Image: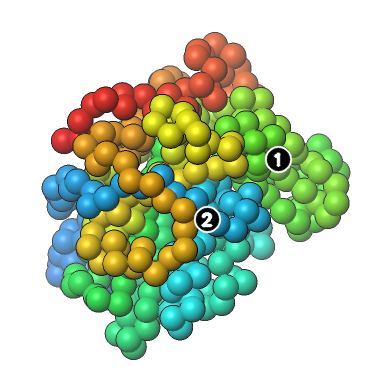
């Protein structure tokens, strides 16, 4: 049975919870806001399925991509509304056009981040744009499985560990399944995100239900000068560039990310995803004439099946050298920059103010560090 003695060995993918045939595993939130499995020993039947689906208990080999592209959606409005080049939308629309179903991360009514699915092109918009808090998988693994068994075409998107968790839960390959991982810096604490939103609503003397729109990566100042945007109707509550926004600074400085993100088991093609999408922050190094500061996707194609799907898409793409690590977050875990335990002790005393106190002491500038992870070590060969 699953027993979490070291929280750095649990990524919260939820595969163990969903796989349990007697439903004796539940997810409980810890003091940092992360979900961890808890086993009811009185009903456990010792089938060990929970162990068989765990990414940390089952090593997967690194895998080189089949192709890597610089890619952009040809619809400029889609690009503007996306975090990078709008390639997720192009793939998702193809799936929907072929009577398929798309799974992804969206906001619920309380602006928490959860997984869900859509069968319409209009519904894709909810899954577009990066969301910097760990999403709740819920029952979506099982929902995807039932749709696959019914012969429906399915696109499942998520972080690398979520994609690996899904693949291990399914325990077989489906020709009608496509998986897309979002290359992940790390997942921040849902507790901090909730606290941040409460602070914003209090400052503006409104209730949470008055918030109408949130975008962690708004492009009105450009792709590389993205900002946090929060609105209540037409009123802008937050419009901070990344280097100035309290929440984004804390996230990029790794102050409140999940402990397992420092040793991710699913990077470098280990998740088994057909596609990996990242920001092509290194575009000026390789294709400077193609950089219009509107967003460009670094598209890793990890399977022949994924490569064939791309033939059906009308996107702008250019070949890149597969042997170069064009975005370090594709294959390498992030690193601890400040003692996590020390941060949480200060946070328990000072709340959100702790983020500002610590970030003032840290260098380089968080936005510079974010881009460094995007195009640093570009000459290092993939292992």
Left or right: residue 144 versus residue 324 is: right
Q: Where's the N terminus, which quadrant?
A: bottom left
Residue ID for mark 1: 220
Q: Residue at x 39, y 66 (%)?
A: 156
Residue 137 place in picture, x, y as percent? 43, 62
* Residue beneath disc 2: 73
Q: Quadrant of the C terminus?
A: top left
- Whether residue 216 sits left or right of residue 61 in the image: it is right
Q: Is residue 344 something that shows in the picture?
A: no
Residue in the picture at 43% in, 65% down: 313
Q: Under tag 1, what secondary structure?
A: loop
Q: Residue at x 18, y 72 (%)?
A: 172
Classify 40 as above or below 288.
below
Residue found at the far front of this picture: 289
- Of tags 1 and 2, which is closer to the observer? 2
The answer to whether residue 119 is left or right of residue 64 is: right
Give residue 24's quadrant in the image: bottom left
- Drawn side of residue 76 relative to residue 117, left or right: right
Q: Tell me, yes or no, if residue 98 can be seen here.
A: yes
């Amino acid at each position: 049975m699953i027993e979490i003695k070291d929280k750095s060995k649990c990524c919260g993918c939820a595969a163990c919870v969903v796989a349990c045939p007697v439903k004796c595993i539940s997810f409980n939130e810890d003091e940092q806001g992360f979900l961890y499995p808890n086993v009811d020993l009185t009903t456990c039947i010792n089938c060990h399925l929970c162990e068989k689906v765990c990414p940390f208990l089952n090593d997967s080999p690194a895998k080189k991509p089949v192709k890597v592209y610089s890619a952009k959606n040809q619809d400029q409005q889609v690009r503007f509304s996306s975090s990078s080049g709008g390639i997720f939308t192009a793939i998702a629309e193809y799936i929907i056009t072929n009577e398929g179903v798309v799974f992804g991360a969206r906001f619920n009514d309380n602006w928490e981040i959860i997984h869900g699915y859509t069968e319409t092109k209009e519904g894709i918009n909810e899954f577009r744009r990066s969301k910097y808090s760990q999403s709740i998988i819920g029952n979506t693994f099982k929902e995807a499985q039932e749709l696959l068994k019914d012969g429906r075409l399915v696109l499942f998107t998520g972080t690398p560990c979520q994609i690996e968790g899904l693949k291990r839960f399914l325990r077989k390959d489906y020709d009608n399944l496509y998986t897309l991982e979002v290359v992940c810096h790390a997942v921040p604490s849902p507790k901090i995100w909730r606290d941040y939103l409460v602070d914003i609503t209090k400052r503006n003397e409104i209730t949470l239900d008055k918030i109408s729109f949130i975008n962690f990566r708004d492009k009105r100042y450009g792709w590389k000068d993205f900002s946090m945007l929060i609105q209540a109707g037409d009123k802008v509550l937050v419009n901070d560039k990344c280097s100035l926004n309290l929440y984004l600074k804390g996230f990029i400085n790794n102050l409140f990310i999940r402990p397992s993100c420092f040793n991710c088991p699913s990077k470098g093609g280990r998740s088994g995803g057909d596609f990996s999408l990242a920001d092509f922050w290194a575009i000026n190094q390789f294709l400077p004439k193609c950089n219009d500061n509107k967003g460009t996707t670094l598209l890793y194609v990890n399977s022949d099946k994924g490569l064939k799907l791309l033939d059906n898409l009308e996107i702008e793409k250019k070949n890149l050298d597969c042997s170069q690590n064009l975005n370090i977050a594709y294959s390498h875990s992030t690193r601890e920059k400040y003692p996590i335990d020390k941060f949480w002790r200060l946070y328990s005393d000072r709340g959100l103010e702790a983020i500002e106190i610590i970030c003032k002491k840290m260098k380089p500038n968080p936005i510079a560090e974010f881009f460094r992870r995007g195009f640093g070590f570009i000459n290092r060969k993939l292992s």
